[in-house]
Amino acid sequence: MSARKHLTIATLRRDGSPRISGTEIEFADNEMKIGSMAGAVKAQDLFRDARVAIHGPTADPPQDKPDDWSGEAKVAGKAVAQNSGNDSHAFTIDVEEAVITSVAGDKLVIESWTRSRGYRKIERS
């Protein structure tokens, strides 16, 4: 999730349809945190419905080595407002699910964690 500065966040609009926005995350005090400018639609969405998904940056594998993919990371959970001011909002992400997808040799490796199920690893050929 911290391989690059910019990530993608999905929130829910008032009508329930998804909204995709750019975001940056910070890991501090064992928490995942995001910020938003005051009045941003992303923040308005989160105040109305705290459900959120964040997708980490990905990179294409080298063209001559398609199996050399570094993978991707995703988290889902709820955004908990921590601080709101005139110029910004701060949220902590209460992570409910985390998924890391990567390639190992000829296998797709999916590592996932949920609060209820714990850790699981699946490999697909």
Image (cartoon, grey):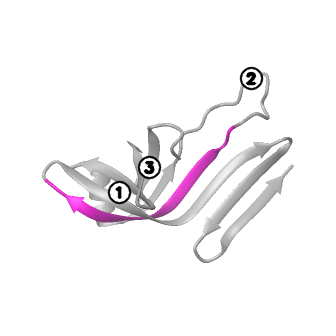
Image point 40% across, 60% down: which residue?
29
Q: Which mark is residue 2?
A: none
Residue at screen point 44% across, 49% down:
9
Q: Secondary structure at mark 3?
A: strand
Q: Amino acid at mark 2?
A: Gln
Q: Does residue 77 belong to the magenta stretch? A: yes
Say if mark 1 contacts mark 2, CB within 8 Å. Answer: no
- Between residues 95 and 17, which one lies in front from this camera angle? 95
Can you tell which mark lies on residue 13? Answer: 1
User: Seen from this angle, which residue lies furthest front?
Assistant: 29
Residues at discs 2 and 3 in contact (Cβ within 8 Å): no
In the shown orientation, is residue 87 left or right of residue 79?
left
Image spot of residue 11 (x, y percent):
40, 55
Rendered residue at 28%/49% (across/down) = 36
CA neighbours of label 3 inside 10 A, class few (<14), some (14 to 19), many (20+): many
For residue 54: magenta? Answer: no
Residue at image mark 3: 9
Front tag of 1 and 2: 2
Answer whether labels 3 and 1 touch (C-beta < 8 Å). Answer: no
Residue 121 horizontal/vertical position (percent):
75, 61
Q: What is the C-alpha distance between the residues marked 3 and 1? A: 13 Å
Which one is earlier in the sequence, the residue at label 1 or at label 2? 1
Range shown magenta: 70-85
> What kind of secondary structure does the magenta stretch mostly adopt?
strand
Which label sits on residue 63?
A: 2
> Is residue 1 shown to the viewer in this render?
yes
For the residues labelled 2 and 3, the Cα–Cα distance comes to 28 Å
